Amino acid sequence: MSKLVLRDVTCRFGAVTAVDRASLALARGEFVSLLGPSGCGKTTTLRMIAGFLDPTEGTIELDGRTISAPAGSLPPEQRGMSMIFQSYAIWPNMTVADNVGFGLEVRRRPRAEIRERVDCILDVVRMRHLRDRYPAELSGGQQQRVALARAIVVQPDVLLLDEPLSNLDANLREEMRYEIRRLHDEFHITTVYVTHDQAEAMVTSDRIAVMNAGRIEQVDEPRALYARPRTRFVAGFIGRTNFLEGEVRGDELVFDGFTIPRARLADATAAAGRVTFSLRPQSVHLHRQPPAASDRAALLPGRVVQRAYLGEHWDYAVRPKDGALVLRVTARPHEVFEVDEDVWLELDARQMAPITD
């Protein structure tokens, strides 16, 4: 049995449909991110799971029991869930230890047990030496650790996080991504995480649900989502990509200025008629001389039209010789090509993912 299930959940505000027939099932102990741009419905979905909003249609189930439905919903305080907000929501007049222990105080746990569990979780988040400090004396990252500790210490059935790292600087965000994943691996709490940041979702999640205009477009493991996006939106939102539009003619795929044998695709039977593929910049390589022939690669001449050095890699824009298409190519720092230089493009056809609009 799934731990948490959304069945065709819809939420409308007047004429506006914020969430449109969203369905999702989380296994016990699974970490799933709702990923998408602002206004796509991910926070509304989280608020329905938490019980702050009722669905207009559909149901939400926890351990097989319906907790949200249009006819009535279980109050948030009876759901056994913990939620971490964007603003942390820790009390400024309480010490770190008091903030973390507050949920246990509300549950009327014995004082000795509260102290033991608070000290234990503060050790886990590496904050025990700051147990007597107040929030104003902490950095943003430390405040976020306090919020995580407070949410976890009560051992919730489900942990909900609403863009918890958006107020942190870039370096702290990167550190806290791994911290959140480390805590999940230790406690195995079923988790729903809302973010618009692709890197956060990729680092923390077992699976990612990509949302667009209120709908869940694709749910998959991070690697599969990146390598095999199913729609144009998912392909463009998860990292950068090249869209190759062509047509199947017999045993060949005909694109703007070049052709590729269908047999070189990972699944040659998937292509028919007019087709669109997503090809990541990392799956295209540049050479000054034509490389040895390969049964999985397509070779074509081109010219560098633009470049940018980004430290960890070069970002090239290359136009195939016989077409107007411009391909983005990611190359290692030592692979240096000049603008207007003639090159050979090597496309890994097995990395071309067929997509729909």
Image: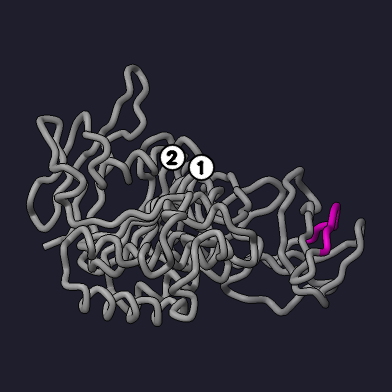
**Marks 1 and 2: in contact by CB < 8 Å?**
yes
In reply to whether residue 303 is colored magenta, the answer given is yes
Q: Is residue 223 visible?
A: no
Disc 1: which residue? 37
Which of the image's four quarters has the N terminus? bottom left
Q: Is 158 or 147 nearer to us in this picture? A: 147
Magenta-highlighted residues: 301-309
Q: Is 129 or 78 nearer to us in this picture? A: 129
**Quadrant housing residue 157:** bottom left
The local crowd at label 1, few if under 14, some if 14 to 19, many if 20 or more residues have their Cα within 10 Å, is some
Q: Which amino acid does label 2 sit on?
A: Asn
Predominant secondary structure, magenta span: strand
Q: What residue type is labelled 1?
A: Pro
The residue mark sitting in front, 2 or 1, is: 1
- The kind of secondary structure element at disc 1 is loop
Identify whether 102 is placed above or below 311. above
Residue 195 location, x and y as percent? 47, 52
Residue 117 location, x and y as percent? 27, 77
Identify whether 244 is placed above or below 189. above
Report the disc number at residue 212: 2
**Residue positioned 48% across, 49% down in the render:** 87
Q: Is 268 or 29 nearer to us in this picture? A: 29
Residue 45 location, x and y as percent? 32, 42
**Residue positioned 14% across, 54% down in the render:** 62
**In the displayed structure image, the side of residue 58 where residue 22 appears, left or right:** right
Residue 127 location, x and y as percent? 46, 76
In reply to whether residue 339 is colored magenta, the answer given is no
